[in-house]
Amino acid sequence: MGSEDKVETEVSPADEETGKKMEPIPEEGQDVDPILNQLIAVVGESRASDMELERIVYSGDPASLPQFHYRWKRKSLVDYVVRVTSVEEVQSVLRIANASKVPVIPRGGASSCLGSSSPTRGGISLDIKLMNHILEINEDQEYVTVEPGVTFDALEKQLVKKGLTFGIYPTSAKSAVIGGWIGCGGRAGIGTPFYGILEDHILELKVVKPDGEMMTLTGEEAGIICGSYGILGVITEVTLKVHKQPENYETYSYGFKRLEHLCLAVREITKMAYKPIFLKIADKELQKYSNPLEKGNFVLTVTYSSDAILQNFDPTSKFELEAATTGHGGEFLGEEFSDKEWELRHDSEFNPKEHCETLMFQELWVPLESVYDLLKKYEDYRVSHKVPALWYGMLGTQEFMRIELFAMINPDHYLKFIASKGVLHKMVKKSISHGGAPYTIGLQNSIYMKRAYPIKYEEIKRAKEEWDPLNIMNPDRITSCLTSYGRIDILFQLATKFRWLSKFIGA
Amino acid sequence: MKIDIDDKLLRHCGSCNYCRDFCPMYQQLGSELDSPGGKIRALRAYREKMWNPPQELLNRLYCADCRMCEAVCPANVPVTDIWHDAKASLLNSGGKMSDSLIQVLAWVKQEGTPFIGFEGEDRDVWAEDLELPPESNTAIFSGCMGSYYFPDQSEMVVDLMEKLKINAGYIPSEVCCGLMNYWAGDDKGFKEIAQKNYDAFKKAGVDHIVTGCGGCFGTLAEHYKRLIPEFDIEVHHTVEYIADMVRNGVLTFKSLEGVYTFHDSCHLGRALGIYEAPREIIRGIPGIELREMAGNHENSNCCGGFLAVLDPDLAEAVGKKRVQEAVDTGADGLITTCISCFKNLSYNARDFDIEVIQLDELILDLARSSVVEE
């Protein structure tokens, strides 16, 4: 990754077996920290803290990975937690951080994975969730202006009262917030195949730069904030396009015996005139833990809104859906199963967690024409490397699908853990070679950024140099990372070989 | 202090944070430190890294006990059990309860009730003129609320049992069910209470218990059975009996015109899955329109009653939010089955134009002139 290929990690000696190395933590009650004093002066004592307990809570994200996984981080705990409620507070906190060269880790719903909001060098966890006001709903011109901490649920409740909907939201909408989804790119969500991706909905963004200056961005300028993971500044206000609320949704689920038939059906559905709100595919293993399949090995679920139904979904079109699915060997799974799939749209990716200690995963953004090749490869790894595999896919656009590959792992089995990560690394490489990329970047996938998104990488890098020359905003991701691609590649290749060998030695 | 609990339970949490925005503690306090997912992250970190957990972690584990986190969790993490086990472990290794909780538990030990100022000898005053047999195979468990605050409810249970021709009795030696001890993580105190009550029941020949209190019902039906392996007594809530009578046409009511909404008690609903019985009873009243709040059934928001022992202001804020939800339905009245919920909701409805009604009392009023088939 150019200069970012350098290994910057300064791993202190740790107990590699147990991962029980304690990170030095300043004792509480010692001399009053001048930075904390400044932060308290801005937000008050109740919303600024350096309490160890609170720092632990604010340093995590949705990844219950074993501690040895984080050994490569320089400093995995933030130094301060600050909860802001206004633009002025954001500006003041960033000015303090910039002047003191203290990293700032913006934190929204903390529902994004892969270390998007967890620190590498300590710093300030900046919780924007209390900035959760809906500032304007314009029914005539169909837009809404909100603060970044508004949850999708809260927004939808207010929009519905006026016959509107935002229409798109991540599967993690129960905890995700608007600002966080913008930071993470917002490409594959429920509704995006029908209404378009999040970037298409942004009319205006207000962002505070690290020096405290407020920027108002539109068009391409706003686009660069999408998928920047908080490394450029803090979003403080968003104006978004909204839509008329559909009357209802209809969901149809089909079971398939063969993967290639499932993938053919998906491609045919995306070519139809009417676009789904939600299209999900999954293997039998994942379904086992949420909505178990009785027919077939793979499931395809597709949901249409009444808009699509009214506009295009005439009896002829319904026949077209039948042809695309049952025509490829799919079997309709019934209304009850289908409705439950829609009900479980937020939960199905997390349901397997009930049955394993670590649900390791990798998210890929894959061209539709390559979905079969990639899933076939992962199915092969399931057998050849004894990977306890599950997978899930969700249509993002008419051309790309988010594929989530899981491995159910007991973290005490270090070799199996690292080897499964190796297999997932191979899948990322394969995805890139097929025109795909890792989906969520966050901390852990930053090593792939330059290879997977070379144009976006250059754009963000230029913006980073201009906006944040001191590199205080969410460091060590997107345009730089703590370890190198080469190092990871060698490590995971070795680990994968061990996994392959374990098939013969029974480890 | 140390956290000596099953590590696997903690690891099943995926930190998706789905629970956070549904948690009444987080809604009021706004810190992830008060959200279930955040606290599990902290427990896991202290458990795995062997740091010395701070007293503040124990303090934060005391919550509304509403179980909303469990209802929304996609991984079915047993949060309530984790809180209980972690509290017990921290208390057993040097952790301290708050002074107010210590006082409450001391009163439970001394007087058999958590209501400071009320005395154990007054517990059965409500039953004095009712000539209930002290020995019976069906015992009415009045609970502390039913004994001290709302004796009408206990009398209603007696009335109900008579109508059903069940020769129910009252065991004068009953003490508090121990819910407060269990919630506090005071395993020793809870075990003593549970054993004392169980011994009293067995001595009186009890094989069925009927109670009108959601908290007592949950504690007896759920926790006693876990603690006492030989526990073989069937525990029922009054709504189950009443719903059965309404269902079979044994109990009918005079009409009541108006729009009413219903508040699900956390202990009766999410803890024990009783959602439909009270609704069947309400729908059995001619003229009544039952209008659900935005949060209903397993998504019912907590009344905040349990928080009164921790922070009355917090309890009030949570209670007012729930009352507002009821007001938003446009209902004339808010019905609940649980006396604790009734107590907190009626207090917090004082500035709203809505009447809070205890279901048992409503039933009793309307059933008095109803036709009860023999």
Image (tube, coloured by chain):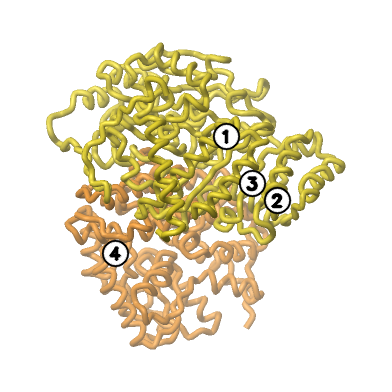
Chain colours: A yellow, B orange
Which residue has dot 4 on it?
A: B181
Viewer-side residue, A390 vs A378? A378
Which residue has dot 1 on it?
A: A365
In space, the residues marked 4 and 1 are separated at their CA atoms by: 52 Å
In space, the residues marked 3 and 4 are separated at their CA atoms by: 48 Å
Q: Is residue A395 left or right of residue A106?
A: right
Q: Secondary structure at mark 2?
A: strand
In space, the residues marked 3 and 1 are separated at their CA atoms by: 14 Å
Q: Are marks 4 and 1 on the same chain?
A: no
Q: Are marks 3 and 4 on the same chain?
A: no
Which of the 4 quarters of the picture holds residue A156?
top right
Which residue has dot 2 on it?
A: A253
Which residue has dot 3 on it?
A: A281
Residue drawn at (44%, 43%) of the image: A422
Contact? badges 4 and 2 (CB < 8 Å): no
Q: Are marks 3 and 1 on the same chain?
A: yes
- Quadrant in which the C terminus of chain A appears: bottom left
Coordinates of residue B42 in the picture (x, y in percent): 31, 46
In space, the residues marked 3 and 2 are separated at their CA atoms by: 10 Å
Chain on which label 2 sits: A
Which tag, 3 or 2, sits closer to the chain's start? Answer: 2
- Look at label 1 and name its amino acid: Trp
- Look at label 3 and name its amino acid: Ile
Q: Are marks 4 and 2 on the same chain?
A: no
Q: Is residue A502 left or right of residue A309?
A: left
Q: Secondary structure at mark 3?
A: strand
Residue drawn at (37%, 58%) of the image: B8
Viewer-side residue, A339 vs A151? A339
Coordinates of residue B100 in the picture (x, y in percent): 23, 54
